[in-house]
Image (cartoon, coloured by chain):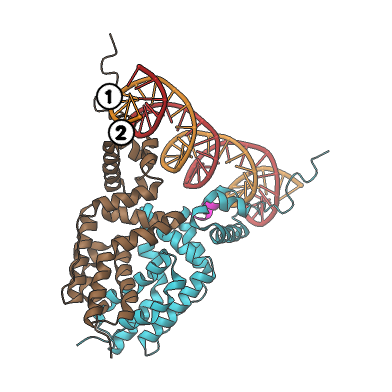
Chain colours: A brown, B cyan, C red, D orange
Amino acid sequence: MKAVKATTPMRRASIGARRNPASQAAILAAARAVLAEEGYAGFSIDAVSRRAGAGKPTIYRWWKNRADLLMEVYAAEKAGIRAVPTDDLARDLVAHTMALWAFWCGTPSGRTFRALLAEAQSDPDALAALREKFLPERLRDVRGLFTAAAARGDIPAEEVEARLALYIGFNWFYVLTDQLEAGQASIPAAMRLIAAPTPR
Amino acid sequence: MKAVKATTPMRRASIGARRNPASQAAILAAARAVLAEEGYAGFSIDAVSRRAGAGKPTIYRWWKNRADLLMEVYAAEKAGIRAVPTDDLARDLVAHTMALWAFWCGTPSGRTFRALLAEAQSDPDALAALREKFLPERLRDVRGLFTAAAARGDIPAEEVEARLALYIGFNWFYVLTDQLEAGQASIPAAMRLIAAPTPR
DNA sequence: CCATAACGGAACGTTCCGTTTCGTTGATAT
DNA sequence: ATATCAACGAAACGGAACGTTCCGTTATGG
């Protein structure tokens, strides 16, 4: 008789001469879980591979490196945090910031984001991808808040970049120091300054 | 006959039953050099050890881990970038920011700082040290600029934290994305906003 | 029906961590 | 004078992770 249950019951074998989307999904889910439970320190390809019940070659068949996987984990998690401008930039920024921080705190995404930024400091390719692809995509909406305000004449158009940098940096500071909870009190004042009408 | 030049000529041997400050200096210099030439990616204890001509145990005799070494490298490099308040917060901030960015660009310190922030994302001890010791020390001066402005009544005292966070984040954003050069143009506008007089 | 390619698993060689062991060195205490 | 002691550089350790390469299995598509 053939070996009883020679293969583990839930094994996700080949589906033929093409990549199995179930593997991709399982790997993404495993990466999420590892980041949620272990943080960036425990996030290793081996750990994800083990957890997903997938071989490492399968991971590298879908993503070219760790940073690439991290970015897709983040993108996949990012629920539809949309930001549509009203007529009050400060109010829009406060609302978006609260939603973003809740997203960072309530999902593994905060940790994913921190891992991403850390990875970009040691991997030039990751930094380039972050700067030229990831950030522009992620910041499209919030940039829209500023350009809309500039279009209304509420802020000078030539200050959009500076104000956007202030906004991004503010968020990064709190997430990178793991002080999102304690920093919430600073949000309204900070957003009021960032959204301040053109002075003088 | 005994082996001619059995020991390398420049070897830095023991100086007796006490730690050799020359070793510490050599290690710090080597760490600087590695960071300058290889960046965070090439910064390994092994590389520093090789470059310094020092044994790894000697490194760990002086510093308890990589993050600890990184922080001392940064502290050792940090020339006296002092910030003494005048009567104009915006002007003080612009001046300090220009000096800081020049320091980050003109020395390995920018890379050291990025390495430090990255290290803190995977090492909880490093994050705690960053938050509770490194940052308060490094930010004492710039915090002084804000409290002085608050004392003058130029900004509300209860907004010091929010404005400081805006300031720190602004710098972090540009250094972490390696955009210090391109971002200089944003400094004046950003500092004007951060230093804006209490609204209304 | 057979070539193809992705699958999970295992092992590869490399790199790095932080630690241990070793023989050597030289200031200090006896 | 000499024994003690701790730090020194070098080398090697065990463990972990990287990214890659094989392997036998699987099932599709030509």
Q: Is residue C18 left or right of residue A66?
A: right
A131 relative position to B50: left or right = left
Q: Chain of mark 1?
A: A
Q: Amino acid at mark 1?
A: Thr
Q: Quick check: C4 above or below B25?
A: above
Chain ID for label 2? Answer: A
Q: In the figure, residue D18 lies in which quadrant?
A: top left
> Do callouts 1 and 2 mark residues in contact (Cβ within 8 Å)?
yes
Q: Amino acid at mark 2?
A: Gly
Residue A81 lies in the magenta-colored region: no
Of the numbered discs 1 and 2, the one sitting upstream in the chain is 1
Chain part drawn in magenta: B58-63
For marks 1 and 2, give the CA distance: 10 Å
User: In the figure, residue A80 lies in which quadrant?
Assistant: bottom left
Q: Which mark is residue A8?
A: 1
The kind of secondary structure element at disc 2 is loop
Say what secondary structure mark 1 lies in: loop
Residue ranking furthest to the top? A1
Q: Is residue A108 left or right of residue B75?
A: left
